[in-house]
Each structure stands twice: as C-alpha cells, then as structure tokens.
Amino acid sequence: MIELNGAVSNYVQLSGKRYSFFSGNNYLGLSNHPEIKQAAKNSIETYGLNFAAARQTTGTSIIHLQLEKELSAFKNKEDTVVFASGYLGNSILLHALKDQYTDIFTDEAGHPSIFDGIPRDSRQIHFYKHGNVEHLEDLLRKNKDRRALIITDGIFALTGDIGPIDEIHSLAEKYRALLVVDDAHATGVLGENGQGTPEFFHLQDVPGIYQTETMSKALGVYGGFISADSIIINRIRESSRAYLASTSLPPPIVSAASTAVKLIIQQPRLRSGLLQKARELREGVVKLGFFTNEAPTPIIPVFFNSRDKARNLSGYLKENGIIVPCINYPVNMNKFMVRMTVSVNHSSDQIAELLNTLKRWRSEYGVT
Ligand SMILES: Cc1ncc(COP(=O)(O)O)c(C=O)c1O
C-alpha cells in the first residue's frame, strides 16, 4: 500500500517526493479537474455535505434528478438511477431482475461485486472459463430448460481485456438469456460516445442488454448508476433494499458528477486522447517483449509466472520514481502482474520514460 499526500494525477506525492503515476482508474484525468472541483465547492456552499436521508424519504434533491437526466441523455436510455457505489450496482440489478431468471452464468474472472451481488436463494450459479464462449455455450446448452442470465465484466478490472460481448450476446439471443455487462471500466472510455462495451460492439440499442456502471473511474467522482428502460428503473426505485435503505449521494458528489458527464459529452477528445496514449504504451510494452493483453483499453498489465518477478519490477519502477502496483492474478492461474493504467494526461515523454525504465529492468532481469 502507498500513502498519498496529494491529489491523484499523472504524478503523485508520496512522503514529500514526486512520482510518475501509472495506477488507479482516473482514465480521463477528471478526479482533479478544476471545473469539477469548483462544482463540488459550489454545491457544498448551497446544499451542505449531506441530505442525511434516503432517496425515497427526504434525500432526493433537484440535483439528483438533474444528474439522472444527464446520465440518461449520455447513455441514450429512458431513465437512470444513481446510488451509493458502483459495487452495489450488480446486486441492485440482479435483484431487480430476479423474477426473470433461475440460473446465472458468469465469467470465472469476474469482479467480486458480481458474485457478491447474486441473490441468496436457490438460484444456480455457473462459472465459465475466462472469456471462453464455447464453454459458456456448453453450460447454456446443458441448462437450456432453465431461464438464464449471463453477467460479465465489459473491461476486466485487472487484466484489461474486453469481454466478448458480441459473441455472448448472440448466445443470449439463441438461449433467450438476459445479458448484464458490468461496465465500471468502460463508461466514458469505450464506444463512439463513451457509452461503454455494448457501444464498442455496436450493440448499444439492442434490447435485453443491461449495464451496471460507476462514476468513480473515468468520470473521476464517485457513486454507481444504472441507465435502462423506465420499467426496470422504477422497479429499482420501488423495491431495491440497497437503494431504499441508504443515504442519498452527497451534494458535492452529485454536482461534480453532473459536470463530469457534461465534459465527457462535450469533449470526445478526452476519450480519443486516452486511447491514443494507451496505444503508445501498449505498443512499447509489446515491442519490449513483455506479455500483455491486446485490447484497446487503458489497462495494460505485464504478466509474469512468478510473484517475485512481478514484485521486483514494481519495486524497481518505484526506485526509479514510477508507481505501478504489483497485483495477484484474480483467479488461480499462477499468473502475477504489474497493472499499468494510462490517463489522457500522461505526456508522451512520461510514457517514453516508463518504457525506458522497463527496458533497463528487462536487460537486468530478463522477461519470462
Ligand atoms: C468491474 C468493477 N465493477 C465494480 C466496481 C465497483 O465500483 P466502485 O469502486 O465505483 O464502487 C469496480 C471497481 O473497483 C470494478 O472494477
């Protein structure tokens, strides 16, 4: 763990020293954006820190309703509900849909919030091998008399690869399954309008695909949201325990998120700039002979088959003024990684410096 003593940007301060920072999920550099911070400050002046009530009692303000409208416009969906954290989104949606499925099919490398969000009853859970649509189909075929819901990450949080949503959607149609995409890392990043993984695969207007999303990554703020047809959003508002029994999002967060959504809509260059920076870093990493993913995402891991090697690289980078954390692979595949993430604010020089440091490490320790 590192202890920050300043804001997160493409550089950070640790114990009085400045480090180049290729970690976290502040993809569009919005977590320290002046306009967004000003919106939060103004909101505190007007509304204070907290409405101190749940949404359905006295915790709904005009700024919550405005944010939900803005998110619906951004996502081109009928309605939106915002809530306390992205982590809750899968639980909220899986509960709201629970009359429509008996079995859940989910990627073995999925985010913990998916597994934790599955309603605790007699529902069957089937894990398919990571990204493996043949295995998924096999499981669906064996359970074809059941009512299926498939849930997968859009961009996988640690490995940065993209779930094969196009192929999974074809299977969902074939086996009349619902499809849920946890798009925490893809919101504001993938697709022509930043609407996420379904848009990346040109499936954004297809009925039967739901997304769970967060405002804590590319949007740089905090809180979760679901944009969908008004029937499902009303069901969440009327029956979700996590929504009904928790305090509404704080005013500075709501106002900051509104400004972040506006910037994401108005400045598509943030997204194209980010993807360009991700390409630069990924191409450099591949050229150096390291093993990484091939997806066009801002998460660029370097995989190792030894924990010591991954730790060694992370430590070496830190000694050379660069923060990149070492992370255990999320499923038991004997793989370890350093997880680099890129932001639109990284300069090409900063990326070149990271690549040069990787190159020096490689000549000292080899790649494997
Ligand atoms: C795939 C995925 N889903 C959900 C979440 C939870 O989002 P939040 O951190 O905004 O609660 C995360 C964040 O870590 C994530 O990576």
Image (cartoon, rainbow, N blue to C red):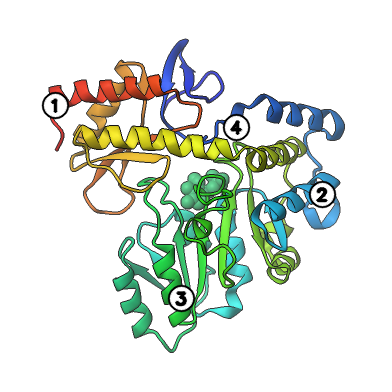
- The residue wearing badge 3 is 172
Q: Quadrant of residue 51?
A: top right
Whole-number angstrom distance, CA of label 2 to CA of label 1: 56 Å
* Quadrant of the image containing the N terminus: top left
State the SS at label 4: helix
- Residue 200 vertical position relative to residue 280 in the rendered view, above or below: below
Q: Earlier in the sequence, mark 2 or mark 3?
A: 2
Q: Earlier in the sequence, mark 2 or mark 4?
A: 4
In this rendering, the label closer to the viewer, 2 or 1: 1
Q: Earlier in the sequence, mark 2 or mark 1?
A: 2
Residue 157 percent location from the top left of the image: 42, 47
State the SS at label 2: helix
In this rendering, the label closer to the viewer, 2 or 3: 3
* Circle 1 residues within 10 Å: few <14, some 14–19, many ≥20: few
Question: Which amino acid, mark 2?
Answer: Gly
* Quadrant of the image containing the C terminus: top left
Q: Earlier in the sequence, mark 4 or mark 3?
A: 4
Q: Quadrant of residue 301?
A: top left
- The residue wearing badge 2 is 59
State the SS at label 1: helix
State the SS at label 3: helix
Q: Quadrant of residue 99?
A: bottom right
